Amino acid sequence: MIFYSPKHIEHKPEKEIDKGIFVKNSDTPQRIEEIAEILVKNDYSIQNAKEFDESFLYLVHDKDYVEWIRKRSKITPPDQEYFPEVFGYDRLFDTGTPVTWNSYESALYSVFTALTAAEHIVCGNMFSYALCRPPGHHASKNIGGGYCYFNNAAIAAKYIQKNHEGNIAILDLDFHHGNGTQDIFYEDPSVLYVSLHGTPEIYFPWIEGFASEIGEGKGKGYNLNIPLDPDTGIEEYLKLLITGIKKINEFSPDCLIISLGLDIVEGDMQGGMNIKTEDYKKIGAVIKELDYPLLIVQEGGYDGKKNGEAVINLFDGLEIKRRFL
């Protein structure tokens, strides 16, 4: 089942600061709307997300952080955007993630979308896809950034564990390292985090995502980063993906969550790899070997038309219709 909230359309950040100048913000409603449109054209049904109690945010996020986002959204005029001024006081770690009058509500409904999909898994189903926006994997317990306010995939993982005890594997395929997801589970042996991403030596978020980061304390060995060089093509990508697949199979989770970024597609304005939309069929075929309940949570991907094509190819490779629907 595929879940979606039209609330994301109201989230329309106009600007971000890149290299000291204002540029157009890449997180547009179109990037999700075109995925939904092509899914419907290919006979996939989409259901609206249901609402949950806002307290589910606290499965992952500190209360003071949630309140900061809520208050900052409330006091920001509809015709303005708030950019971080004093890091530490402001709870966003970059200048690409402005707060608008409805950032809190849009991010909350993005969480509701992930929770609806997670509930579908808890109810005994083998597949669900949360068309989340804004994305989430850069948001940690007490700070956001990278277009992310609340960590959808992490909240979904905690929700599944709350309602169905077990181990969770998160496979992050976004072009950018999910520093927030890593931070949240870095000392948690019940959640394995595996990420393939552009090397942080060159790409955002720069501060995390190195291969040497393997977890700490009880979580040591449950964090696997696989940094990728610029212009990585599909053959090298699949080889490294298989490394991550083996790690997940050794862990043998009760559920697999995929943080699905589509910005590894060549030409994506935020990416830097040489992966074609049709290559997602090969990616799906490799992931299909992981025979666990599967929850896909949408992250990045900033070319609407290519996003839709990539998802359809991924679903074909995963054989979603034959296996799950």
Image (cartoon, rainbow, N blue to C red):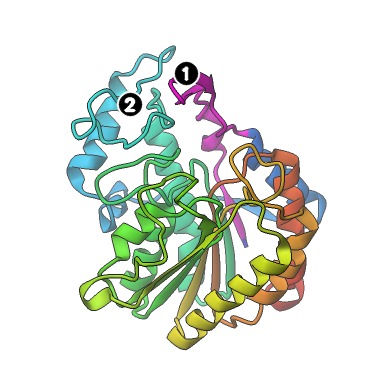
Apparent side of residue 309 relative to residue 238 in the rendered image (left or right): right
- The structure residue drawn at horizontal position 66% and vertical position 58%, both measured from the top left corner, is 232
In the rendered view, tell whether residue 134 sits above or below residue 87. Answer: below
The residue drawn where x is 72% and y is 74% is: 285
> In the image, is residue 308 above or below residue 162?
above
Question: What is the three-letter code of the residue carrying label 2?
Answer: Ser
Q: Quadrant of the C terminus?
A: bottom right
Residue 320 shows up from this direction: no
Question: Callout 1: 10 Å neighbours few (<14), some, many (20+)?
Answer: few
In front: 97, or 9? Answer: 97
Q: Which residues are magenta?
A: 2-29
Whole-Å distance between the Cαs marked 1 and 2? 23 Å
Looking at the rendering, in which quadrant would you find the N terminus?
bottom right
The stretch drawn in magenta includes residue 16: yes
Q: Amino acid at mark 1?
A: Ile
Residue indicated by mark 1: 21
Q: Is residue 53 magenta?
A: no
Q: Is residue 225 something that shows in the picture? A: yes
| Residue under label 2 | 73
The residue carrying pointer 2 sits among few (fewer than 14), some (14 to 19) or many (20 or more) residues within 10 Å by Cα, namely: many
14 vs 146, left or right, is: right
The spot of residue 316 in percent (x, y) is 77, 67
Q: Secondary structure at mark 1?
A: strand
Q: Nearer the viewer, mark 1 or mark 2?
A: 1
Q: Quadrant of residue 125?
A: bottom right
Q: Position of residue 165 (x, y in %)?
A: 34, 79
Disc 2 element: helix
